[in-house]
Each structure stands twice: as C-alpha cells, then as structure tokens.
Image (cartoon, rainbow, N blue to C red):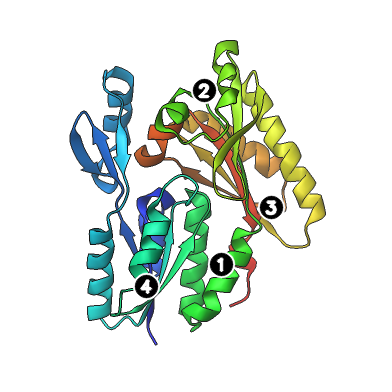
Amino acid sequence: MTTAIVTDTAAYLTTDQIAQYPITVLPITVILGGQQYPESELSLQTFYNYLKTADELPTTAQVSLGQIEEAYDTLASQGVDEIISIHLSSGITSFMSNLRMFCKTYTKARIFPVDSLVASVGEANLCLLAGKLIAAGQSAAEIVPQLIALRDTQHVYFAVDNLSHLARTGRLTNRSAMIGNLLNIKPLLTFNEAGQIIAIDKERTMRRAFNFMTRHLAADFQRVDYPLHATVIDANNEETAQRWQQALHEQFPTIRVTRSTLGPAISVHTGEKTMGIFWQQDWQSIPD
C-alpha cells in the first residue's frame, strides 16, 4: 500500500517540508487586476505592492477539481493507492464540499479528504503529521483519525489592522464587529468550531493583542496533559513576528515555538501586517 498527501498553498509549507514527505501542493490562484497568478509563483513583494497601490482589490480562486483530478491521476499512475487530501477550512471556502462529492466517483485511488478547519500552519501540521505516519508505515485509515485528534487540539487567535478585507470578501461571519475600524483598534479574530472566521474582541495595540493571545495560551498550557507547539504567524510583518517569537520562548520555555507566514491567498482576506498565534498538541510528540 502506497500513500501520498495532497494539499494547497494555503498551508504555506516550506520547500524542505514538502521534500521531506510525499506531499503534492496545488496552488490557489490569486487574481491581481485581472491577471491570474498561481500563489506559488507570486512573490510577496509583487502582491503587497499591488495591495498598496492598485484601485482594484485582489481576489482568489480556489484549487479547481480539474487540478485535483490531474494531481490524483499523476499519483495513481506512479503507484499510489491512497491519497490523504488536506485542505483549507470549509468555513471559508466551498472547496471541501466539492471535493467530497468528487471523491465519491473517483476510482483510480482511494481518497481521504481532511478539512483542516483553519489555514496556514494548522493545515501544514496535519500534512507533516500525515507524512511522519506514512514514513512509519501506517495506512491512511490509521492516519486520518490521528489527524482529526490533532485538529481537535488547535487554537488560533489573530489580530488585523482592520476588518475591511474580511468584510469585503465575505470571510467574516459576525460582521457587526466592523465598528472596530472606526475606533482605531486591532480586531481580534479566531476560527470557530465550524472553521469560520469570527471576531471575538478588540485591543488598541498589537502589544495588547499579543498579551490577549498569550493569556489564552497560558490557560491552555495549564489545562492540557500533552506537549504544545506554538507558531507565530505574520503577514509581511517580520520585525513584530521576531519579537513575538522571542517573547514566547521566554514566557513558555517548554513549548516548542516556530514561525509561519500568511501568503497572498490568505492576505487577500486579512490584509497586510496581520499577526497571530496558533497552538496545538505538538505533532512531533505523537508516536508513530
């Protein structure tokens, strides 16, 4: 039995991570002024320059079922029997429901769709755990329940400069939080259990937003009986991300702390300078 992983660029896996495991990454399309770019081929500089200067706001198009079928067919032709397909939250895109319908009729390999219920590092960690367990010889049927168990431990909070991008693209579920933009505050957001983005609070500075997030992390750290892995996430906000990572190292020396980014496909909705902290059970601690 040969097992492979398919995901999308919203996971923001690094080149080394992709090379380490049998992972195929399909690009989400970013549309700038009518010009379409696979996210994997769009530089951050080009994207953010456009975001700052263009009159027409960027949009995205999810991975198509044609791309999915081509990727699955290629893997099947290489002898892959089963595919774990891990993708962006169904709470912010209809892709997962379309994929599940497609998988009912696909016959060249057995497909196991997994809804990350989030984006970025939450999606990436599922891919990395799946890769680790595949390398240990586990089947997809054995792996998927462990992915769901890992997903159930995830928490994420993020702060945006304003909610205009999320409101424009329809990715914010409770739009009444728009009042925050009028008060020069940093709206605090999370993903709910359905994988939808919701506004939950607001702070006046990123420092206070960081303190809000770390209070929740500290409470969870005291509650759980497994090692935690925390990741600082930023959208073109390198200096602040470095400060946050160092602060987490100092405040939580026993928690593994890493960094990840939000690329164009997600920053279309969140805007530039978004900052967040994601944490869950450390996937590296899960026995294989």
Asked whether 215 or 148 is in front, the reply is: 148
The secondary structure type at the circle numbered 1 is helix
Asked whether 68 or 223 is in front, the reply is: 68
Residue 161 has which mark?
2
Q: Which residue is identified by label 1?
A: 147
The secondary structure type at the circle numbered 2 is loop
Q: Which residue is identified by label 4?
A: 104
The quarter of the picture where residue 109 lies is bottom left
In 3D space, how far apart are the residues under numbered discs 4 and 2 (Cα atoms)? 42 Å
Sequence order check: which comes first, mark 1 or mark 3?
1
The residue positioned 35% from the left and 82% from the top of the image is 81
Question: On the rendered structure, is 254 left or right of 73?
Answer: right
Q: Is residue 112 above or below residue 53?
A: below
Residue at the farthest bottom position: 1
Q: Is residue 6 visible?
A: no
Task: Please state which amino acid type lies under the numbered disc 2.
Answer: Asp
Q: Which residue is identified by label 3?
A: 255
Task: Check contact, mark 4 vs mark 2: CB within 8 A.
Answer: no
Residue 62: x percent and y percent? Answer: 32, 48
